[in-house]
Image (tube, helix red, strand yellow):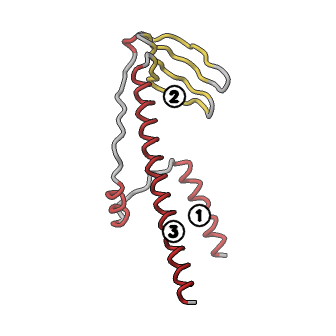
Amino acid sequence: MFFLVASSDIKMIGQFICLFLLFIFVLFFAYIAARIAGSFQSNVNKQGNIRVIEIYRISSNKTIEIIKIGERYLVVAVCKDNITLLTELPESEIIEQERTLEPIDFKQILEKMKEGKFKSPKLNNETESVFTKKNRIKRRNNSK
């Protein structure tokens, strides 16, 4: 009887190890596939003659975009269902900025939070006043 219980425990542990190894295998191949697809996509974008220089969001589904096509700079309005050419800009009016993303050092942010030196972004005055009014009303109601 004891031998049968030990045998089923060993079988369960073996299944768990196999499942874990299969999970690691799938994660590894998903990572490789994402890297290959990302490098392919970035190479396609670099080789093209069309680049988006800047995007300005007007509303949730409306933007104004400056696009470089060949040597021409175009300003287009992009809506949900259509794209409208607004104007062509001379190259002298364009200020291209290189956009680089700085890596975020989460360890440094965590240390600042532990020390209490991390400051959350300030809310605008309108939002702060709403919160202040709500807190005053709560305190007034609680004191009664």
Q: Say if 14 sits above or below 105 in the image.
A: below
Q: CA distance from mark 1 to mark 2?
A: 36 Å
- For label 2, the residue is 56
Q: Position of residue 21 (x, y in %)?
A: 46, 60
Q: Mark 3 or mark 2: which comes first in sequence?
A: 3
Q: Mark 1 or mark 3: which comes first in sequence?
A: 3
Rendered residue at 44%/23% (across/down): 53
Rendered residue at 51%/22% (across/down): 65
Q: Position of residue 55 (x, y in %)?
A: 50, 27
Q: Would you say the residues marked 3 and 2 are in contact, meaning their CB atoms lie under 8 Å apart?
A: no
Q: Mark 1 or mark 2: which comes first in sequence?
A: 2
Q: Say if 125 sits above or below 113 in the image.
A: above
- For label 3, the residue is 16
Q: CA distance from mark 3 to mark 2?
A: 51 Å
Q: CA distance from mark 1 to mark 3?
A: 53 Å
Q: Nearer the viewer, mark 3 or mark 2?
A: 3
Q: Nearer the viewer, residue 109 or 42?
A: 42
Badge 2: residue crowd in 10 Å (few <14, some 14–19, many ≥20):
few
Q: Say if 118 sits above or below 79 in the image.
A: below
Q: Quadrant of residue 91?
A: top left
- For label 1, the residue is 135
**Quadrant (top left, top right, bottom left, bottom right) of the C terminus:** bottom right
Rendered residue at 49%/58% (across/down): 22
Left or right, residue 57 beside residue 71: right
**Quadrant (top left, top right, bottom left, bottom right) of the N terminus:** bottom right
Left or right, residue 6 beside residue 82: left
Q: Nearer the viewer, residue 61 or 29?
A: 29
Q: Amino acid at mark 1?
A: Asn
Q: Say if 133 sits above or below 67 in the image.
A: below
Q: Secondary structure at mark 3?
A: helix
Q: Nearer the viewer, residue 11 or 25?
A: 11
Q: Amino acid at mark 3?
A: Phe
